[in-house]
Image: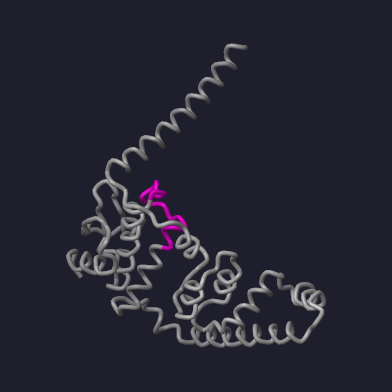
Amino acid sequence: MHEIEIKQFLTELNSGTPNFEVLFSGKKSKKIDGLYYPSKKEILLHNLNFISDAFLLYTAMHEFAHHIHFTTSLTATKSNGHSTEYWAIFHELLFIAEKKGMWQNPLKNECTSLLQIHTQYSELSNKFANEVAKLSVREKDQSLFFDYMTRILKISKKEVKALLKVDFLKIDLKDTWIGSALKVVATKKCEDWMIDSLKEGQPETIETLKVKMSNEVDYKSEKELLEQQEQSLLTRIQKAQNELDSVRNKLNKI
């Protein structure tokens, strides 16, 4: 693939971000596969590193997520930071690419045995949640019910309640991961759209949901970026000045 094709691919995933450029270094790097330069809004890819287009596009999406994060989030202070918000953006890009049939993880077709085990595990998890729900309904004394679940089965009360909710909402755990599902339904801010995303098989993690629950971020203008950098530098200078004053006071007392 060429640089123009990769840019078109990324733009189709998210066309609402500020303009950016994709460049090949024409080199091979042992340290990194790609870089994002925020000052130039430029994605640099060490194209000789890649043995397949799938790997190349994965790295391109990784760096594109940095671009989206840096240009749309007021909390993005480091262009290469891998924060919770960053991973939410990156995973969303991967999900969109797979859903549109534009990209697929090559391991998806290779790890059939792992997928089968996951499916069996998920089916057992649904059965387990259902049995927990049946026991909860049958046992009038909820204290004894929770004692059995927490002390004997070693399941926390919060997880038990989440299992009951998973069964009540009929969430098919084949479409998600039980750990993520339990965290989602257990959160106090769990909303209908979160449940829908689980039922649709969207790979939501609790980290992604936390980001989505926050207010929408605004696009940062060049002035806002500079003001943010200025404030960060002023804070560091003030901290250094305080430390310097403290050292000088100690010296004066000697």
> Can you give x and y, in whole percent of width and height, for residue 181 in the image?
56, 74
From this view, report whether residue 241 is shown above or below residue 68.
above
> Closer to the camera, 11 or 146?
146
Rendered-image quadrant of the C terminus: top right
**Residue occupying image coordinates x 27% and y 46%:** 39
Image coordinates for residue 248, horizontal then vertical, percent: 54, 17
Image quarter for residue 67? bottom left
User: Which residue is pictured at 41% across the width and 83% down the height?
Assistant: 110
Q: Describe residue 220's horizontal placement relative to residue 248 as left or right.
A: left
Where residue 130 sits, quadrant-wise, is bottom right
Horizontally, residue 137 falls left or right of residue 78, namely right
Is 62 drawn above or below residue 169 in the view shown? above
Q: Nearer the viewer, residue 212 or 14?
A: 212
Closer-to-camera residue (110/250):
250
The quadrant of the image that shows the N terminus is bottom left
Give x and y (percent) for residue 57.
Answer: 29, 69
The one nearer the camera, 247 or 195, is 195
Magenta residue span: 74-88
The residue under the point 22% across, 64% down is 7
Q: Position of residue 75 (x, y in %)?
A: 42, 49
